[in-house]
Amino acid sequence: MDGLWVDVLLLVGGLIVVTLGAEGLIRGASRIAGRFGLGPLLIGLTVVAFGTSAPEAAIGVFAAWAGEPEIAIGNVVGSNIFNILFILGLTAIITPLTVAQNLVRAEVPVMIVTSALTWGMAWDGRIETYEGAILLAGAVGYVVFAVLRGRRESPAVRSEYAAEYATGRRSRVWGEALLVLVGIVLLAGGARILVAGATGLAKAAGLSDLVIGLTIVAVGTSVPEVATSVVAALRNERDIAVGNAVGSCLLNLLFVLGLSVVSAPAGVPVAPEAIRFDIPVMLATAVACLPIFFSGFRIHRWEGVLFFSYYVVYVGYLILDAMGNGAVAPLRWAMLTFVIPLTAVTLCVITFQALKRHRSGGQASERTA
């Protein structure tokens, strides 16, 4: 029992240290980027985006290097499911989200394609080193894409980012560099502590490393994204709230997973249950975003409740399945025969209504002309 509490303390302590490291890295790097003339919009789309993915990257790299691939895979897949279902759901419940940012509209189809590509890479039970390099190259391409698209954003979107990511008064450059260095050290040290605690907790509780990675580690490393999106929603900075969640999903697949795979001695093995269930769920959540973002680029409260509820059901399923509970079979039956079909019908109705509105708008424009 004492060992269990030690593992819990290591896990919680690692999460705290990793979060502090990410915060220091983001603050220092943002100020340095501001010194080189990078505007708030580009700082938000690049420096802050990578900074909020730093906890996942640190833990993924260390887990892969330490021979704990299930934590590395579970961290990425679980974080993406958490970002879409929990974070977007929660922020939409707080305030309906209207998406004006052009980049987000382009990111959703790319996120779907990247999720499907990741599933394809994992299909044979292993993501090879060269496939990780392909994902990293995609991360570089995403940065270039974000910068180019960011230059064409509307003044309203730019003002949101200016209010959130203005660098403010700068300290001495050595102080900013020291902040970045301390952030990196905390990330590395916190990742090592967290992986040790997560591994020990999984063994003590009889759970697999994959389940721990999909739940506790994924939620813990997504704390920066939760804070950013919720605060942005409360400040009515809705594009930042949505862009943070969607952009983080892309970076998790391209940057975090790519770096984790390349860091491993011989690629990263993928557990069969992740291929059969968890990665398809991640792909399904990405696909679910498409009609919602297409329907006037607005996420309503009821859609937020739907997403949030799905996350609760997903985590409940993982826990019951890991415990060998008999309720797993009825829950799976309910998902297959009621929840998923109902959701599919709902999304089809949303898409049909959006197409109808767009068609009516186009015909009205033609009559006016």
Image: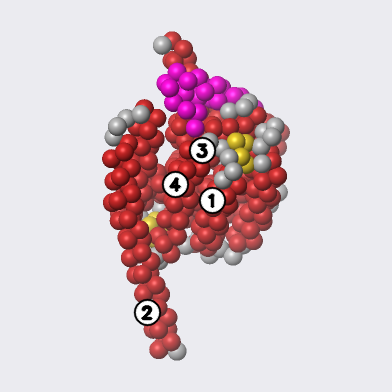
First to last magenta residue range: 185-210
Mark 1 vs mark 2: give the one in front.
Answer: 1
Q: CA distance from mark 4 to mark 1?
A: 10 Å
Mark 3 vs mark 2: give the one in front.
Answer: 3
Seen from the viewer's position, the closer of residues 213 and 116 is 116
> Tag 3: Cα neighbours inside 10 Å, few (<14), some, or many (≥20)?
some
- The residue beneath circle 3 is 272
- The residue beneath circle 4 is 281
Q: Residue type at mark 4?
A: Val
First of labels 1, 2 by sequence position: 1
**As drawn, which residue projects farthest toward the top?**
2
First of labels 1, 3 by sequence position: 1
Q: Where is residue 144 shown, x and y percent of the image?
A: 67, 56
Mark 1 vs mark 3: give the one in front.
Answer: 3
Q: Residue type at mark 3?
A: Pro
Q: Where is residue 317 shown, x and y percent of the image?
A: 36, 37
As drawn, the label of residue 115 is 1
* Above or below 278: residue 344: below
